[in-house]
Image (spheres, helix red, strand yellow):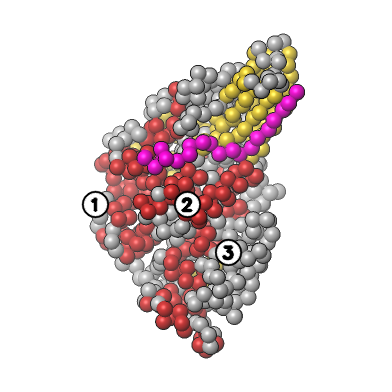
């Protein structure tokens, strides 16, 4: 089993905390900082060890913004998908569906999924447990099980070495951890002694932790496509590619930086508070809960908010924490949900209504959508989708036309109020649309995989290509850039209005010349109802639990942008 930090738990006792309090603290500050020993093997530790100094305390000013609001890494991280990646009920349901679809490859499937969602397990001795089902480590009463359940924890991201980052070898959790038990951060001359004594790790200045290539390790995911018998079909499928999308955008800050250069961390670990002000604060407190006198405020302090758009699973973790083994309080998840909704509504995309004309008995107009993110929207796992909800009303407010409306369960409905056939398991795949003429036609931005025979599939390890991928491209995306073919849109041929940075769609609605207003909303659904329907084709305990929790959640799509035209 790989070496762990020496006597880590013993050093987190009240006795050790007391040593750093009061007058005894002065003596400790004089101790010389010890350089890391030679190679001892990669080590990992649970997040609570880091919380000893990197969580907020009422008695300390450390890790607070200008208004005194707590911004401690542990506190913010604990209510995120990163912290709960191994507890995520949707992930567990999807893994169980993949195993049910290809039971002969159970061990391989589970081990691969654990690499990103439970990365500490393999460094802590997962293989030595010799579990027939690797994912059972999440229920294992052992040190390895404890680490496995702690998700994407502190010593993973801060323990990754820079070697090979941003290359093919580093993708799909191909990162390496430091073998001298160093934890990397962007701050110069860190006060190392307390961390060394309490955890066995040495804080070390390194710039690579602020690069997008670090995030690319797990957020560039390749799979080996399988057939129904579990045999590989010879296709390496790029299931998720936010990093490669970003690298081919105006937001890239590698090589030849784009005009909007910004790293992943710029948005997801921002260096400003909720009002946009730069944060300057001490980066740690002492274990007794007070400030470290030798630690001065730092001006490049990142909020470990890790805000994305998955409000659905975050609400499950908030509402069913005890059942899911969650350790963070409900308010931590609500904080992340609120931040996700704010980011979706203010920094994700814009819509506008253009060229409105009533002529020849018809209402004609264009809807333009602009992607403001540094990657596709939506990006990542193909379970996510966005679409346009368009409502046309007369002068009395009566609805004349609606496209993209949903029912009480979040399914997209047609003119009769019933779910579109494309919302049902085994149903047709909605085509890409450049023009809309009827209520049953929806402008949908999402990706649908194809298997090795070219058939649509929602089983990840059957994925060998795309039936359709018309997620909005980032601004600056170029077809002649490196890796462009791997992130190119699919199914948009002939649509000259689908371009880097956005899309424009024509609406031609007969008989609506008396329309007085048009309302357009770009909405986003973290968990596609079509995907949920496909998931239910398999009968596993994990899927049954997810469905039960999902039925108690709010399936309404999230509002991203809105525009209104009035006569």
Quarter containing the N terminus: bottom left
On the image, numbered disc 3 is attached to which residue?
Answer: 70
On the image, numbered disc 1 is attached to which residue?
Answer: 132
In percent of width and height, residue 282 lies at 60, 71
Locate residue 210: give its quadrant: bottom right
Question: Distance from label 2 to label 1 (Cα)?
Answer: 27 Å
In percent of width and height, residue 440 lies at 53, 20
Question: Distance from label 3 to label 2 (Cα)?
Answer: 19 Å
For the point 39% across and 42% down, the residue is 549
Relative height, residue 75 to residue 407 (above, below): below
Q: Is residue 535 left or right of residue 52?
A: left
If you read the primary sequence from the N terminus, does the residue marked by circle 3 or circle 2 appear first?
A: 3
Quarter containing the C terminus: top right
For the point 32% across and 62% down, the residue is 144
Relative height, residue 468 to residue 115 (above, below): above
Characterize the local packing of mark 3: few (<14), some (14-19) or many (20 or more) Cα atoms within 10 angstroms. Answer: some
Q: Residue furthest front?
A: 396
Characterize the local packing of mark 1: few (<14), some (14-19) or many (20 or more) Cα atoms within 10 angstroms. Answer: few
In percent of width and height, residue 221 lies at 45, 46
Nearer to the camera, 81 or 341? 341
Question: What's drawn in magenta, residue-wise?
Answer: 548-567
Characterize the local packing of mark 2: few (<14), some (14-19) or many (20 or more) Cα atoms within 10 angstroms. Answer: many
On the image, numbered disc 2 is attached to which residue?
Answer: 81
Helix, strand or loop status at disc 2: loop
Helix, strand or loop status at disc 1: loop
Question: Distance from label 3 to label 1 (Cα)?
Answer: 43 Å
In percent of width and height, residue 29 lies at 54, 85
Is 411 magenta? The answer is no
């Amino acid at each position: 089993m790989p070496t762990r930090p020496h006597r880590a738990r013993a050093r987190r006792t009240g006795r050790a905390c007391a040593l750093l309090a009061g007058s005894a603290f002065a003596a400790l500050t004089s101790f010389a900082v010890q350089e890391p020993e030679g190679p001892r093997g990669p080590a990992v530790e649970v997040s609570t060890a880091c919380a000893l100094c990197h969580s907020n305390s009422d008695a300390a000013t450390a890790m607070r913004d200008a208004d005194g609001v707590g911004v401690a890494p542990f506190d913010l991280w604990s209510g995120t998908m990163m912290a709960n990646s191994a507890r995520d009920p949707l992930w567990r349901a999807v893994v169980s569906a993949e195993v049910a679809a290809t039971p002969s490859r159970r061990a391989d499937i589970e081990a691969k999924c654990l690499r990103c969602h439970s990365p500490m397990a393999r460094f802590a001795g997962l293989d030595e447990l010799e579990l027939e089902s690797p994912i059972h480590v999440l229920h294992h009463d052992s040190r390895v099980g404890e680490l496995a359940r702690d998700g994407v924890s502190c010593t993973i991201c801060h323990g990754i070495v820079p070697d090979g980052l941003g290359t093919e070898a580093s993708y799909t959790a191909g990162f390496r951890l430091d073998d001298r038990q160093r934890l990397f951060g962007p701050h110069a001359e860190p006060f190392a002694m307390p961390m060394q004594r309490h955890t066995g790790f040495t804080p070390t200045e390194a710039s690579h932790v602020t690069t997008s290539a670090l995030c690319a390790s797990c957020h560039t995911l390749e799979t080996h496509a399988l057939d129904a018998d579990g045999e590989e079909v010879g296709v390496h499928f790029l299931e998720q590619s936010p990093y490669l999308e970003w690298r081919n955008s105006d937001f890239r800050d590698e090589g030849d930086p784009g005009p909007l250069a910004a790293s992943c961390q710029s948005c997801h670990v921002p260096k400003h508070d909720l009002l946009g002000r730069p944060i300057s604060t001490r980066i740690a407190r002492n274990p007794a809960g007070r400030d470290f006198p030798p630690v001065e405020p730092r001006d490049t302090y990142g909020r470990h908010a890790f805000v994305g758009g998955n409000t659905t699973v975050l609400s499950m973790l908030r509402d069913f924490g005890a059942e899911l083994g969650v350790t963070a309080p409900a308010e931590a998840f609500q904080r992340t949900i609120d931040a996700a909704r704010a980011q979706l509504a203010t920094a994700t995309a814009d819509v506008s209504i253009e060229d409105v004309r009533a002529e020849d008995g018809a209402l004609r107009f264009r809807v333009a959508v602009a992607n403001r993110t540094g990657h596709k929207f939506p990006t990542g796992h193909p379970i996510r989708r966005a679409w346009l909800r368009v409502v046309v009303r007369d002068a009395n407010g009566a609805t004349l036309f609606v496209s993209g409306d949903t029912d009480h369960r979040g399914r997209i409905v047609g003119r009769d109020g019933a779910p579109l056939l494309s919302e049902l398991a085994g149903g047709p795949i909605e085509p890409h649309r450049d023009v809309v003429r009827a209520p049953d036609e929806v402008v949908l931005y999402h990706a649908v995989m194809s298997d090795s025979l070219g058939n649509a599939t929602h089983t990840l390890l059957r994925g060998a290509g795309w039936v359709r991928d018309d997620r909005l491209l980032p601004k600056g995306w170029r077809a002649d850039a490196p890796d462009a073919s791997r992130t190119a849109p699919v199914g948009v041929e002939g649509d000259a209005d689908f371009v880097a940075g956005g899309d424009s769609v024509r609406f031609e609605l007969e008989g609506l010349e008396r329309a007085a207003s048009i309302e357009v909303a770009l909405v986003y659904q973290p968990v596609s109802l079509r995907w949920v329907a496909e998931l239910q084709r398999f009968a596993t305990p994990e899927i049954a639990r997810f469905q039960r929790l999902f039925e108690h959640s709010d399936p309404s799509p999230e509002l991203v942008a809105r525009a209104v035209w009035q006569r």
